[in-house]
Image (cartoon, grey):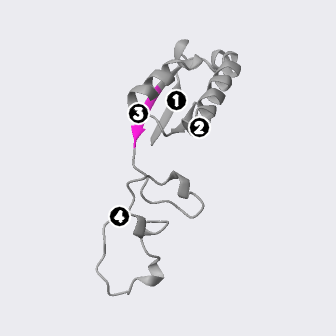
Amino acid sequence: MFVVTLTYVADISEVDSEEEAHLAWLDSQFADGVFVASGRRVPRHGGVIFADNVDREELNRRLSLDPYAEKCLADYTVIEFDPTRVAPGFEKLRSDTASPGAGVAGVPPRSAVPADAPATEA
């Protein structure tokens, strides 16, 4: 999975003028099953995208087609990570490499661990 952060490098009026095209581009990425979530950063100085079911090279190709990229309105940072622990309700975000016996969050609830048990790393 990838987390992509966009940081606007142009005046917000220029960003706004391309917003409709950017939203259409986002829609196409969701339709392809590549984007999992997206939204504005708060305060509004960019955005965040979660992407999956794609390799880095293909993700970079897709990002280059974003109207914000084509018009040089935003910089992009891509971080790859392997979500092995998730909160209840977010099981679909969990990677295929997570241990099947680890439970939804990847660890037993604190109440199931004796108080005198040695600490484990997260």
User: Badge 4 is on which residue?
Assistant: 122
The span from disc 4 to disc 1 (Cα, nearest Å) is 29 Å
Dot label at residue 55: 3
On whether residue 78 falls in the magenta region, the answer is yes
The span from disc 1 to disc 2 (Cα, nearest Å) is 9 Å
Q: Amino acid at mark 1?
A: Leu
The label nearer to you, 3 versus 1, is 3
Give the mark, 3 or 4, whose residue is nearer the N terminus.
3
Where is residue 59? Give x, y as percent: 46, 29
Where is residue 60? Give x, y as percent: 43, 25
Where is residue 66? Give x, y as percent: 56, 20
Residue 120 in the image: above or below residue 67: below
User: Badge 2 is on which residue?
Assistant: 41
Give the mark, 3 or 2, whose residue is nearer the N terminus.
2
Q: Secondary structure at mark 3?
A: loop
Q: Amino acid at mark 4?
A: Ala
On whether residue 111 falls in the magenta region, the answer is no
Find out whether the residues at labels 4 and 2 contact each other: C-beta distance under 8 Å.
no
